[in-house]
Structures are given as C-alpha cells and as structure tokens.
Image (cartoon, helix red, strand yellow):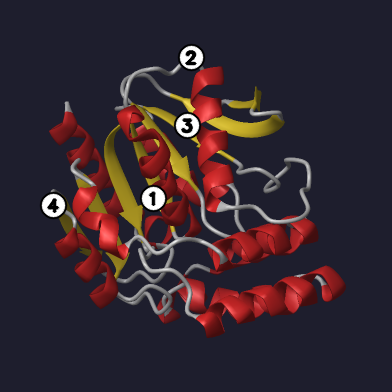
C-alpha cells in the first residue's frame, strides 16, 4: 500500500514514501528530482523490505531552501529521518547520481548504520574546476531564468536515446518534476555538488557489500567509469543494465529490481 507521510527531522519537514515490512531500504533520489524517481521500485521491493524514499531537503513538495546544500547536509538529514522513523537497525542505502554522492557522505559519517550500499549511475570523483565552474554559472542562470531550458537539455542526457521516444510518459513526468523544483533549491544543490569531496582514494575503506548499477547507455556517468569504481571497492558487485541511460532504475526496472532483490537477499 502506498504511504506518503510528513516526517519532522533535523529541523525540517520531509515528504516521505514509507511502505512494506522487513529490512530497511532507503532510496535517495538524484538531481533535481524527487521520491517519484523510484516509483518503478516501490511495489515490488516493498514486498521484501521496508522501503523509505524521501524528498530530499528543498526538493519535491518540501519547503524551498537557499544558500548551499552540501552532500553532508543531506546525509545528516537522512540519519535524522531514520531516527524520526525509529529505525535503529542497519539499513541498505540506494542512491542514484547525486543520491550516490550523498551515499558516500552517509557512509563517511554514519557507516555503523549501514549493512549495504547500492550505487546507481553515479561517480566517486569530485568535479573538475571547469565542471564546478559550470555548475555555479548554471545556479545563477536558474535563479534568473528558471530551469525549463536547462531541464530540456538535461533530459536528453538522462534517458537512453530509444527511451526518449519509447517512454514519453516518463520523459514528460521527469521534465515536470525538474521544472517545478524550487529555483533556489536547484541552485543550492548545484553549489553543493560543485564543492563535494573526491572519494576515489577512499573506496578501499568501504568494507561492506556494495551493488554498483549502471545503464549501458549512460552518458553522464559512463559504464567504464562505474566499472572502475566497482573494481576499487573491496566487496562490490557490478551490474550493467541494457537499454538504459542515467536513470537505469526507471528505464529498465525489471532488471534493476531483480538485482536489488537478490542483493537484499544476500545480506540477510
């Protein structure tokens, strides 16, 4: 049964999907999306786990924020959210793209609360100076002009080429979410991503089971880069998802859901 609830945590109100029983699976969405990014996972995975999927601070229907949202800020919010939901046993955290950046910070700050990580279409490296500068420039443009043009451009990179036309309802919903996200929140997250730390030298420290998932047609975080991340993690399994770009759980949910179920089963 779908369950959306409001949860107070870390001084903020969070819109949160919460359904199912069993081990906790915490989904962390990408930029600039919301919890509905995981809608293709909810029904199946809530049969085998308690699925928690919040709108991150400032995103979705949550109140807008200003300034800079560091990835560690989001990680602190998630830890407080788990406390508010009375979840004290170790969880599995599944993050996509920016959600992966947040996952690294959650591990760094709260590793005792994890029994597994799932990293979808993300990277461990920080931004180059040029990419960081581009994010900061985009933040200023979004404040001034909104995200419509940037969202249309971004959408072309999010989905595999064939899914642009074969999944028009998905493309339309993604664009709606992106263009209705608060401008100040988008800018704050862009600033935070531009400042995020490089995790590549620390991957060898992450001594817990990790499932690394990447769409075979991802042009934002390419498969070769994610294979390298998986190879550097001591206990990682790498899965490449066909017919999928940067949003593999949404583009090819059958394969992704099966891999996540198997991974959860291996942790029990």
Image position, residue 252 (x, y; %): 34, 60
Please report whichever mark, 2 or 1, sits nearer to the chain's N-terminal start. Answer: 2
Q: Is residue 230 visible?
A: yes
Q: Secondary structure at mark 1?
A: helix
What is the CA distance from the residue labelled 2 to the residue labelled 1?
23 Å
| Relative depth, front residue between 207 and 91 | 207
Image position, residue 71 (x, y; %): 53, 51
Q: Residues within 10 Å of mark 1 (few under 14, many from 20)?
A: many
Kindly indicate whether the residue at mark 3 contacts the one at mark 2 (C-beta within 8 angstroms): no
Q: Residue at horizontal 17%, vertical 32%? A: 267
- Residue bearing mark 3: 52
Q: Which mark is residue 104?
A: 1
Q: Nearer the viewer, mark 2 or mark 3?
A: 2
What is the CA distance from the residue labelled 2 to the residue labelled 3?
12 Å
- Residue bearing mark 2: 86
Please say if 14 is above or below 221: above
Please report whichever mark, 1 or 4, sits nearer to the chain's N-terminal start. Answer: 1
Q: Secondary structure at mark 3?
A: strand
- Residue bearing mark 4: 234
Q: Residue at horizontal 31%, vertical 24%? A: 23
Horizontal side of 178 relative to 112 (left or right) equals: right
Q: Secondary structure at mark 4?
A: loop
Please say if 4 is above or below 145: above
Q: Nearer the viewer, mark 3 or mark 4?
A: 4
Horizontal side of 146 relative to 223 (left or right) equals: right
Kindly indicate whether the residue at mark 1 contacts the one at mark 2 (C-beta within 8 angstroms): no
Please report whichever mark, 3 or 4, sits nearer to the chain's N-terminal start. Answer: 3
What is the CA distance from the residue labelled 1 to the residue labelled 4?
15 Å
**Picture quarter containing residue 162?**
bottom left
């Amino acid at each position: 049964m779908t369950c959306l609830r409001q949860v107070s945590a870390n001084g903020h109100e969070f819109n949160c999907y919460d359904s199912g029983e069993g081990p906790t699976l915490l989904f962390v969405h990408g930029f600039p999306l919301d919890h509905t990014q995981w809608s293709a996972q909810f029904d199946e995975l809530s049969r085998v786990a308690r699925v928690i999927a919040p709108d991150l601070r400032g995103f979705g229907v949550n109140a807008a924020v200003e300034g800079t949202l560091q990835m560690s800020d989001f990680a602190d919010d998630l830890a407080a959210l788990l406390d508010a939901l009375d979840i004290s046993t170790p969880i599995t955290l599944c993050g996509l793209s920016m959600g992966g950046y947040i996952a690294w910070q959650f591990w760094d700050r709260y590793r005792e609360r994890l029994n597994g990580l799932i990293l979808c279409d993300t990277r461990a490296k920080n931004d180059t100076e040029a990419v960081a500068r581009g994010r900061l420039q985009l933040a200023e443009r979004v404040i001034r002009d909104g995200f419509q043009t940037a969202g249309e451009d971004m959408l072309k990179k999010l989905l595999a080429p064939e899914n642009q036309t074969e999944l028009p309802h998905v493309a339309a919903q993604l664009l709606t979410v992106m263009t209705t996200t608060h401008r100040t929140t988008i800018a704050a997250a862009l600033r935070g991503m531009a400042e995020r730390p490089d995790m590549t030298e620390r991957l060898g420290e992450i001594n817990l089971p990790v499932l690394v998932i990447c769409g075979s047609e991802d042009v934002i975080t390419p498969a070769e880069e994610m294979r390298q991340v998986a190879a550097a993690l001591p206990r990682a399994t790498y899965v490449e998802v066909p017919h999928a770009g940067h949003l593999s759980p949404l583009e090819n949910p059958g394969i992704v859901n099966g891999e996540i179920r198997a991974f959860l089963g291996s942790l029990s």
